[in-house]
Amino acid sequence: MARRFDAEGLAAMALPVTYWVARHAQPPTPMGGTGMRALHRIRHFIFAFGQAKRHRTDLIRHIGRRPLLAGATVGVETAMLLSNKMDPKLKDLAELKAAGMVSCEFCLDIGSVLATSSGVTEQQIRDLPRYRDSAAYSEIEKLVIAYAEAMTLTPAVGDDLADLRRRLAEHLTETQIVELAMTVAWENQRARLNQSLGVRPTGMSDGATCALPEPAS
């Protein structure tokens, strides 16, 4: 009879390999050129997970109960890692803004580590709740954060988003805007799923600057 694996069994099999790779990964060094962005992001992603100190099995323990959905999630996450037409720094700022508005501490934990690796400064991480009045961001960075904010608000107001798209089009191509929109939408999915399942931060950003949940306005 074929052996059946439950969520705990899946986690027990997958996590030792994942964390062995992560723990033995060396700190990534910056890479130049858009063609190297995907590899650069994947290396930083693995390295970030290697810094996890607690609650390591929270997410896989939950989604492992529905293998089909877990596989679909891995597929989208992989596609997002491989989609690199846009500056990763801009995407990381957008993701952190969305995660802060949803108050997903797990997302803010890993997101702060990844954002630092793509060039986001400590001041930029700290100033996200008041980005409009901060001198830490460029014009395009503020537009990207505003777009993430408008997408994450409930309701998402179509007229506001249309205006922001027009302004973004002065700096980005249509392809890059689509990638940005997908990035923010997927971060909303991540953050809301993690919050609804009680996925806790793992301590990846311990000892470093970490973005904080934003109080509802």
Image (tube, helix red, strand yellow):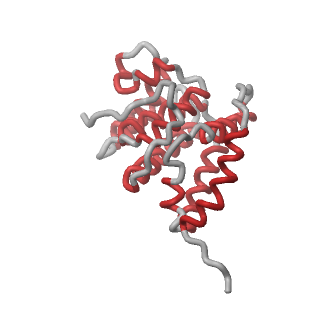
- State the residue in front, 177 or 66: 66
Query: In the image, is 202 to the left or to the right of 129?
Result: right
Q: Position of residue 83 (x, y in %)?
A: 64, 43
The quadrant of the picture occupied by the C terminus is top left
Q: Position of residue 154 (x, y in %)?
A: 30, 45
Q: Identify whether 161 is placed above or below 17.
A: above
- State the residue in front, 150 or 171: 150
- State the residue in front, 163 or 21: 21
Toward the bottom, the furthest residue is: 1
Residue 132 quadrant: top left
Query: In the image, is 173 to the left or to the right of 188?
Result: right
Residue at (56% x, 61% y) in the render: 70
Q: Position of residue 95 (x, y in %)?
A: 48, 37
- State the residue in front, 124 or 177: 124
Residue at (28% x, 34% y) in the render: 215
The quadrant of the picture occupied by the N terminus is bottom right
Q: Position of residue 175 (x, y in %)?
A: 59, 40
Q: Identify whether 42 is placed above or below 169.
A: below
Residue 115 quadrant: top right
Residue at (35% x, 38% y) in the render: 101
User: How many numbered marks are there?
Assistant: 0
Toward the left, the furthest residue is: 217
Q: Identify whether 6 is placed above or below 36.
A: below
Residue at (71% x, 25% y) in the render: 30
